Amino acid sequence: MTADTSTATDYLEQLTTALPGLNLSRVADWGERLAQLGTDGRRLLVAGNGGSAAQAQHLTAELVGRFQTERPPISALSLHAETSSVTAISNDYGYEQVFARQVRAHARPGDIVLLMSGSGRSANLLRAAEAAHEVGAVTWALTGPAPNPLATLVDEAVTVTAKALSTVQECHLVVVHLMCAAMDAAVAARGDSAADAEDRAPSVRPTSSVRPRSSLSSPKPVGERRPSAARGDRTNLVVVGDAFLDHDYVGRVERVASDEPALVVTGGTTHMRPGGAALAAVLSARQGYPVTLITALGQDTVGDQLRTLLDAARIKVVDLGLDGPTAVKTRIRAAGRTLMMLDEHDVCPPVGREGEAALATARRVLMAAGGVLVSDYGRGVAAHAGLRTVLAEAARRSPLVWDPHPRGAVPVPHTSVVTPNSREARLVASLAGGDTLSDDVEAARAVAREWRPVQVALTRHEHGAVLLADADLPPLVIPTKVAAGGKTDPCGAGDFFAGHLTAMLACGQLPSEAVASAVEAASAYVAAGGPRSLNNPPDDDSQRPGLPSAGPAASMQGASEVADAVRARGGTVVAAGGCFDLLHAGHVRLLEQARQLGDCLIVCLNSDDSISRLKGPSRPIVPAAQRTLVLEALASVDAVVVFDEDTPEAAIRTLRPAIWVKGGDYAGMDIPEDKLVTSLGGRTVVVPFVAGWSTSSLIESARTL
């Protein structure tokens, strides 16, 4: 008798039809993110019912034990396996709360809660997802066909389109194994081993996850904590705080008053712009992010002017209502400096004229935010009791940065980072002292202990910033290239720093990365004229903060300015060209010798496309933006210009170097640029060759190893 295989065939057809529909990209991403849990103190909590419970326990066993390769154990718990908790909670609170109560007990901000359900409708899993959101955990779901309530409620879901529940569960098992395989691969790529895990002392504090960084990222300080993951649009920022109107009266000083020792400012013009939290909102919006401002405005002419300016900047405003006039600050400036500041209505009136409706709107906005910046100017908004309750809830869901004021409110619980400047930090901590690095670090430690647990990014004006992830551990110090003094206007630099930091945290960067990026961005803001830059058109989305552009137009302008300035004072402009793909001792010596021939050295650097055409598709090893940064860091190099052509003829025509330098390996050879350099009145020279060094040999040695 021949067995009927039609049932089995039909069953397998359903499975093979469902498997290709899996979101494999998301599954692989989940596996890589599970690998990070072993390095930063976070954990995975998994819950499911029936067969899904068994698969949940299967997954946690693979993480705590091993899947295919040796690696450190990863913290993972199956909530249904806590039998005493399950029965006690079910008895006392009902089975709907069996997982939710455990999530509230065990989950912390940044932990991952994975919920597995064939239908996506189990009430106890829906309640668990809601509880995870409350504590700031990341929520994933494995479900059957979408749409379903659970897939809609969580942050990310992998759904299976199949008729039979058994097919869904078998696909879920495939997903579990695929995640584990991706996890093992990620750990192997990171270089962890079981021996590494054994060597770790139990007293060491958990560190943040290993992750790719841009070339501008700073080393991650031990003990650094990643903020809670944003649940809303990660680029959607909300600024909360006191808004006022800034007036700048800019004139000139040519004499001192005859009847008293006072400067006479004449010929002035008045410039008007948003101030306080409103300025922080405008500066964030000009970096390309949608911004909502939650503030309190008065029903007066100044308030109307401020509303008009915010509308022109495309800032959405949630107005809580101000019981009093809108504040005005006036700066009197001359010769690039502020001579006096007038602060009108320097009182903290209560807010809340608009009542519960405005507060409800504020809550909806904050719950959907990718990142929140509280820009506290000590006038009452950040101290509003109802708003503080909402802010504390929002801080569990998204990164919240608190820019404090000495007269302002204490940061709410779960704040990710506070950003006092040196003076504010000393006032908060009641410390004396100067503005040395040591003084600032001690002030940051005192703030961290006063408001713990919180990370402190103390801004040091023209000296950069200090990031303290833990009051008991060494700080991360981020210097800046902007020089002190001069005619720069630092007004708004702190707001720019805090807004940029919030945006970078919302985009998923570690605090160390975000602070380094914010220091660079705020420095560029000051160098561009500070608040004067608001008169220029805002950058488009392609110019959002990140790696500096190494494109020909961007680099040529700076290099040309260097050359013109040297020629203007009778100096000699020297230029050299090359790929400089892997900078080595031969390159360094070449550039040092070239710089000794004149008063500045400009390096003409092949772009990535140019190198690929010359060297082949496997080159360059190092992108142009990073090669530029390395070259600019050399004392011998004054500027770098990137060119896209095979030879830098266009750059040479613009720079008109008096001396064009080539390495000794070109001795006795016809140099392509020589005729052009000579026609422009310059001279081509060759400097001695450093034997034993070449990029090609370095690459080959690395491949051999």
Image (spheres, helix red, strand yellow):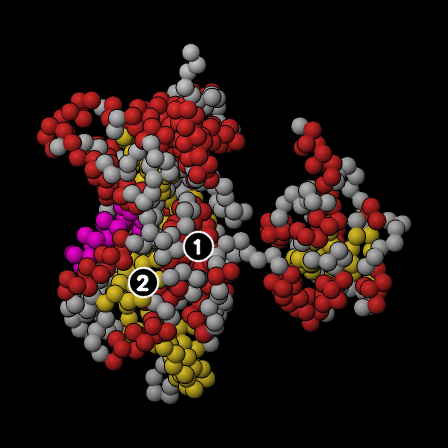
Q: 590 and 73: which one is in front? A: 73
**In the image, is 692 to the left or to the right of 491?**
right
* Extreme-left residue of the structure: 92
Q: Amino acid at mark 1?
A: Ala
**Precedes in sequence: disc 1 or disc 2:** 2
> Where, quadrant-wise, is the C terminus in this rendering?
top right
Q: Which residue in the protein does label 1 denote?
A: 518
- Magenta-span inclusion, residue 277: no
Q: Disc 1 or disc 2, which is closer to the eye?
A: 2
Q: Is residue 69 above or below residue 637?
A: above
| Residue under the point 33% across and 36% down | 143
**In the image, is 546 to the left or to the right of 98?**
right
**10 Å neighbourhood of mark 2: few (<14), some, or many (≥20)?**
many
Residue 538, x across and y down, in percent: 46, 68
Is residue 418 shown to the viewer in this render?
no
| Residue under the point 88% across and 51% down | 669
Mark 2 lies on a secondary structure that is: strand
What's the mark number on residue 292? 2
Q: 127 and 19: which one is in front? A: 19
The quarter of the displayed image where residue 64 is located = top left
Residue 670, x across and y down, in percent: 88, 54
- The magenta region covers 384-408
